[in-house]
Amino acid sequence: MSILEERYRRLLALYPAGHRARHEEEMLGVMLARAGRERRCPDPRDALDLVKGALLIRARHALGPGSGGSWRDALNVAAIVAPLHLLVLEMSTWAMALWVLDGTAPLMFAINPLAFALPHLLIVWLALRGPRWAAATCAWVWAAASTAISVRLSLAANVYYGQEPVPFSIGYLFSPLGLAFQSLPGAIVALLLTVAPGAAAGAALAGRRTLLRWTAVAILTMNGATALEHFLVPDQSLGSLASTTLACMACGAASRTPVGRRAVTLLVPLLLVVYGGVPKFGGPGDGWLPVLVQVLVGATAFVVARRGFRPYGSGTVSSPEPLA
């Protein structure tokens, strides 16, 4: 295989597998004949046409008349994964009780994660067992209640600090922008549960054992990372790194199937709010190196999971499982 043919095949890899099986050799032959033997790089116009064609075909597959069933299934999957994800995040902070045991944090620092996990547990249970409207109603009620609690804590913080300088993390969390971001995850979950035809069907499609396995692994990993941070590296946010890595793994595994890719697309607003919309604790000048490390680790986890890393399914991009 010549260098030119190899580079053209890389561009053709942008097309869906079915289209490549039918037309790849024909398209490749036409482009190689037109390029001549001396050329080593694809013609820029050919490369642009190939990329444009791949985008158009994938958009037609994703949004065409025949994609309605896939989007419906993806909506059901997203409707169960979203509240389960928030439940995992709440339960994954229980190791923070270590800060209470050594006297560096008040008791409420350990009680709050437990109290906030219970509504999410109820929402997940209703989504799996109860009628459709029950889970959506509970989610809307909790979204409003959690927002009211955040506003009440904001007022209490303002009274507590008075005219004194407020720490950056506390000041942002209780600012209008911070309060708005805190209310968004609950509202997104409630919206998904409202419009989804059946979250329980989404759990069955994704696989109840798969969801249970991901839940257990995520909770244990993130609590373990938090404990390691407490005892060994208190200046590093290992819990944040663990949560981002696990989320990238889940997205990579899901992206192996059409329904999984659509589900990840529907979950993008929630992921942006949870992992990108709200600044992490600390000042804005904490440095770029931890952020770069987190991005690189997350990208690596996504690629490995997408290619079919065995703990996350034996399927691959070219031969996926029904839904990872």
Image (cartoon, helix red, strand yellow):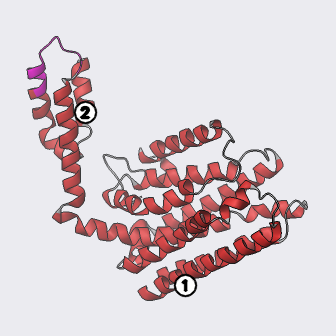
Q: Is residue 223 left or right of residue 262?
A: right
Q: Is residue 275 above or below residue 146?
A: above
- Residue drawn at x 66%, y 63% is 173
In-image side of 95 versus 311 (left or right):
right
What is the secondary structure assignment of the residue under circle 2?
helix
Q: Position of residue 252 (x, y in %)?
A: 44, 50
- Does 36 lie within the magenta span? yes
Distance, label 2 to label 1, CA atoms, is 49 Å
For residue 156, what is the image quadrant?
bottom right
- Which stretch appears magenta? 31-41
Q: Looking at the picture, which amino acid does disc 2 mark?
A: Leu
Q: What residue sits right under mark 1 in the picture? A: 141
- In x, y percent, where is residue 60? 19, 55
The quadrant the C terminus occupies is: bottom left
Picture coordinates of residue 214, whole percent (x, y): 55, 61
* Circle 1 residues within 10 Å: few <14, some 14–19, many ≥20: some
Which one is in front in this view, the residue at disc 2 or the one at disc 1? 1
Circle on res. 11: 2
Q: Earlier in the sequence, mark 2 or mark 1?
A: 2
Residue 1 seen in this snapshot: no
